[in-house]
Image: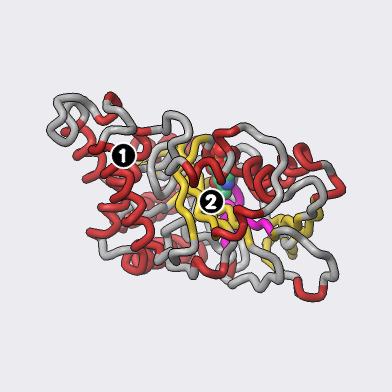
Amino acid sequence: TYNFCAGPAMLPQPVMQKAQEELLDWNGQGVSVMEVSHRSKEFIALTQQAEADIRELMNIPSNYHVLFMHGGGRGQFAAVVNNLLGEQGKALYLVDGSWSSSAVDEAKKLAGDEQIDTLNIIEKTHGVSRVVLPELSELKQEYRYLHYCPNETVDGIEIFEEINSPWPIVADMSSNIMSREIDVSRYGLIYAGAQKNIGPSGLSIVIVRDDLLEYPQLPQASIMDYRLAVKHDSMFNTPPTFAWYLAAEVFKWLKVQGGVAEVAKTNARKAEMLYDFIDSCDFYENRVAKDNRSRMNVTFYLKDESLNEQFLAQAKAAGLVALKGHRSVGGMRASLYNAMPLTGVEALVSFMKDFANGNA
Ligand code: PLP
């Protein structure tokens, strides 16, 4: 079965197999990793290796902290506001789809409308969405940070252009972290819910430049406080240990694949193969400008939408599951995270071809 789910997503098969083998006896302890103390020297060694591996994979400079926190992506929608905005600060949010819009809702809920400015960066022409980045240096406002979402999971929109911002950039990379190389030093803070390219849901990764920890905070739950997380090595309370273990295994797997640069090449090939096919076939369409088509979440529509249910049922019977688009946008979505092999995309294209021929 090839699982095209947008999240929680498919994990690399070798990682799942290893986890299965180690489920009842991890690291010669005679018990599962779920059952050992997070303060044991064995578990701490695991966390140190995980941090070293993600630092190597993403080339994270030494003035950045890496935190393993609870609460997924949405937890960070709140944590960013509470940790960085203070009573007086303002922030600018760029909106390019559903998740950046949800981040705005949460920010306004916590800080109020006056502290949160927004800019819609999507232009729609003849039903095709395109990202148009504003000239930020022309804005005369002082912001504590600029928030944006470089990959909109629901809409299938990705921003490949570097953003030039006079203010620290906070990026929600939940659905494209480690899918291609980025220059971490361009960002003030990067966060990601784990359940696409990293591991099980619930865990979130935060990569934060140390000067942002000096920002005035709003009152918040201690477990979401970046300073406490740094001080306690992400163990202020009991961390999500099993998710952390799996993330550590995914990082090891990524290194065996040749690191982010190598998986990025495969990711580009996978996406290109699927988009090329969609463009070549009258039966399907994609509604995103070529420069902004997501490599992680390929959204597409059957031109005859009355065939949607049939398409999904036959795909499932062929072992291609979770292709239904998000309920807010309809259509189909194939998520091609790091763990999706090229063969999965080949199987999908072959199925789509047959389905189109059979229903033309
Ligand atoms: N941000 C993006 C880009 C996402 O894709 C998601 C979930 O799919 C979230 C945030 C929310 O993550 P979570 O469900 O872990 O809170």
In this rendering, the answer to whether 164 lies above or below 221 is: below
Q: Examine the image and state in which quarter residue 268 appears.
A: bottom left
The CA distance from mark 1 to mark 2 is 19 Å
Dot 1: what SS? helix
**CB of mark 2 near ligand 1 (< 8 Å):** no
Dot 2: what SS? strand
For label 1, the residue is 245
Residue 282 picture location, percent across and down = 54, 60
Instruction: Quarter of the image for the N terminus: give it.
Output: top left
Question: Residue visible at 21% across and 29% down?
Answer: 23
Question: Residue visible at 35% across and 35% down?
Answer: 317
Q: Which mark is residue 197?
A: none
Q: Amino acid at mark 1?
A: Tyr
Is residue 150 one of those drawn in magenta? yes
Classify the position of ligand 1 by quadrant: top left, top right, bottom left or bottom right. top right
Residue 333 picture location, percent across and down = 51, 48
Q: Nearer the viewer, residue 45 or 14?
A: 45
Q: Can residue 174 be seen from the camera position used here?
A: no
Residues in magenta, as a range:
146-158
The 10 Å Cα crowd at callout 2, few under 14, some 14 to 19, many 20 or more, is many
Q: Which mark is residue 191?
A: 2
Q: Amino acid at mark 2?
A: Tyr
Which label's residue is closer to the chain start, 1 or 2?
2
